[in-house]
Amino acid sequence: MTKVSKVSVQTAYGFLTNWAYPAVLLLFFGVVWFAVSQSGAEEARVIPPPAIDEKSQAKEEVAVIAGGCFWGVQGVFQHVKGVTNAVSGYAGGARKTAHYDMVGLGSTGHAEAVRITYDPRQISYGRLLQIYFSVAHDPTQLNRQGPDIGTQYRSAIFPEDVEQAKIAKTYIGELNRARTFDAAIVTKIEPDQTFYPAEAYHQDFMVLNPSYPYIVIHDKPKVESLKRLFPEQYRSEPVLVSAQPSN
């Protein structure tokens, strides 16, 4: 099955931007659209909600998750009602190496992650995890997501507290026992890790670059799956990092 990775698309897209020969453009986009028809995003599926969930009375809570390239994960949760912000970044490694060029080497310990700020009165942590496992990524892929390979693309949850860790661990156990997926869930639970926001050019990437080949192939279908499988949680207008008030 043909797959188009983020790195290969970035390289080719940059080449075409600098050397926009018509024949090369036709050939490249022909290959890209062939890949669209043959691959695309990981298949979304209906899964049950978790048996236990948070009981927060706060007005604001935070969830940090990783599931492959952060462009798509951020894009999905920007369309979820109750989410007030979703920031792309890095978790699982040190501050000094939390930079895209270094994380991309796969040796820093980071995962491309998204920090989700949400109103628990509108959406719960458990529901966020249900969307995460259902449409945002494939939790059965080890140290990769689709065509993107490396520990920086691992499936991981970075709980903010003991309650979140318990909910996530219990939910993974439920889904595995029910054999909800064709293979075992490999999502890691990694507590006590710091989140570092990614560079500004990564924020709101799906919204700002809707025709970028990687986005078209791998990420837009995830938002369509969110709309189809979670119509009550879906909102058409995404909440943007660029629209957040500055401190």
Image (cartoon, rainbow, N blue to C red):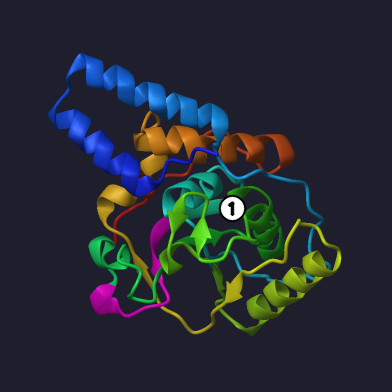
Q: Which one is in front, 174 or 59?
A: 174
The extreme top residue here reads 22
Residue 198 visible, this angle: yes
Query: Which picture quadrant has residue 54?
Result: bottom right
Q: Which one is in front, 171 or 187?
A: 187
110 shown above or below 39? below
Please provide percent x and percent y for residue 182: 76, 56
Asked whether, in this view, residue 230 is left or right of residue 3, the answer is right
Q: Residues within 10 Å of mark 1 (few under 14, many from 20)?
A: many
Q: Any magenta on residue 175?
A: no
Asked whether, in this view, residue 29 is left or right of residue 146, the answer is left
Please provide percent x and percent y for residue 179: 83, 62
Assign a secondary structure to mark 1.
loop
Q: Which residue is mark 1?
A: 137
Please provide percent x and percent y for residue 2: 50, 38
Q: Amino acid at mark 1?
A: His
Magenta-drawn segment: 87-97
